[in-house]
Structure formats: structure tokens, C-alpha cells
Image: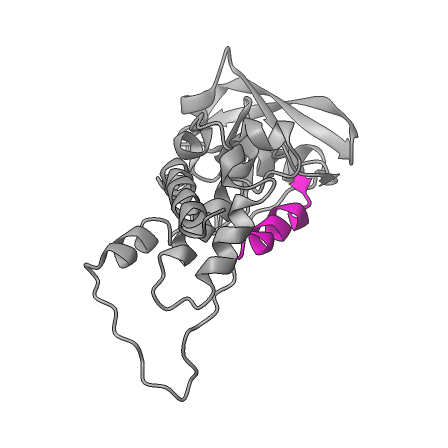
Amino acid sequence: MSERSEKLEVSVWRGQHDRGFYETFEVPAYDNQTILDVVSWIQQNADPTLTYRFACRVGMCGSCAMMVNGTPRWTCRTHVKKVLKDNRIKVAPLRNLPVIKDLVTDMDPFFDKWVKAGGQHRPTRSRHDPIEEIRPSSTGRVAADAGIECINCSVCYAACDTVSANEDYLGPAALQRAWTIVNDEKHGARQEVLDAVSASGGCHNCHSMGNCTACCPNGLDPLSAIAGLKRATMRNYLKRGR
């Protein structure tokens, strides 16, 4: 990378839990520079106490997700030139999650809701049974495959205003996983999943704003998955005569 003469003004959230402030750094501008490059430069050259997460650096793990100028993003895939405003950048921890320190959030509430929505796979057969054949073109398989690439980075969770307003709401990732499970013909507890996502904090709390789909780095569509759950839970409700 070749360094340009100008500097970037980068404001980074610092602190623990609900107490913090924005600290501003001047960072050298480079060609093809990502937000993760910027954060790494600050930690390596300006303040070694800055705390943040990253792993793969190539858009595979999602652990580097942060708020960049108010929008949740994978920082390793976000080029500075695409988000720079008046030569300034603001970087913060993902919203809707407790802050551990600086740019690192506690992911436990996110995964707790994933479990609460019935995200664990429960097979219909044991290892002693023959493998069940599922046609790739079957309706259930197609619906399940649509969300299978979710890596639980929680970008959609941070983008969701309903999560911000309702701490009990399961959130887009958990509900998308539930939709995948409901359509998985090898899953043996579909009714339990439908019961979980139709309860308080479930799919019917979604306001269909679509921020989750708009912000998903993998191009998935949690909004459509949640709409599918709404239809499925209503059919289930009518079928059971409640």
C-alpha cells in the first residue's frame, strides 16, 4: 500500500460497560485501506491498550464487526473510501450488545437468543439409521439453504431497531436460524421451534423495517425468513385450533 499525504481523523469509542467516550486519533491514509487497517494502526502505533476483535481478516469469520459511522459492518471488508465523511470516521462497538471494553462486545445475549429460538439441530434419526436422502430441489431444502450461510456475526442484530426497543426480541439471526430449522426435513422438533418463535419476543414482534437484510454482509435475507415464520406460526395456530 502506498501512503498518501493526508491524515484521517478517526474517533474511536473507549471505555467499559456503559461508561465511555470517543477518543480521536490522526491516522495516515493509505490506498486500499480498510477500517480494520485503521483500527489496527491505532492499536499498533498510537495506543496499545485499544481493545478490539478480529481473526481471519478476509471476510470469513465476522468477528471484526463494529459500528462504522453509525452502521454495523465487517471492518475487514469495509474500505475507508466508501465510508469516509469529511475525512472523518467514527468507530464504535456493535450496538444492542453489552460492551466489555472499547470495541469488544459481549456476545452471550445474542447466542442466548439463538438457543431460545430453537437453533440447535435435533436429528430425526440416530447414527445407526441409514442416512435420509433429501432432494436438493425440495421446497424445504431450498428454503433452508437460503439462510445457511449465516455465521452469527450479529451485524443484523446490531442493525435492528426492534432489538433496541425490546430487549426480549429474539432478533433477526436467531429467527433466520429458526426458519432454517423449521424447513430442515431432518429436524425432529419443528413444533417446538414454532412454539418458541411465536411466543413473546418472537417473530411477530418484527416491524418489517428490513435493516437486517440491508446490512447483512453475506447478502442474506432475514426479513423474508421472519415473514416465513409469521406465516408458518399462523398456519400452526389455525391448525391447532387456538
Q: Residue at x 38, y 43 (%)?
A: 225
Position of residue 134 measured from the top left corner of the image (x, y, whole percent): 25, 69
Taking the magenta stretch, the answer to whether it contains residue 109 is yes
113 lies left or right of 57: right
Position of residue 74 measured from the top left corner of the image (x, y, whole percent): 48, 38
Of residues 199 and 134, the one nearer the viewer is: 199
Q: Is residue 129 above or below residue 29?
A: below
Position of residue 51 measured from the top left corner of the image (x, y, whole percent): 69, 41
Q: Is residue 78 visible?
A: no
Overall secondary structure of the magenta stretch?
helix
Taking the magenta stretch, the answer to whether it contains residue 87 is no
Position of residue 215 measured from the top left corner of the image (x, y, whole percent): 43, 32
Q: Residue at x 37, y 86 (%)?
A: 129
Q: Quadrant of residue 100?
A: top right
212 lies left or right of 157: left
Q: Residue at x 47, y 64 (%)?
A: 189
Residue farthest left in this picture? 137
57 lies left or right of 224: right
Q: Is residue 193 above or below residue 212?
A: below
Of residues 141 and 68, the one nearer the viewer is: 141
Q: Residue at x 40, y 51 (%)?
A: 239
Residue extent of the magenta highlight: 104-118
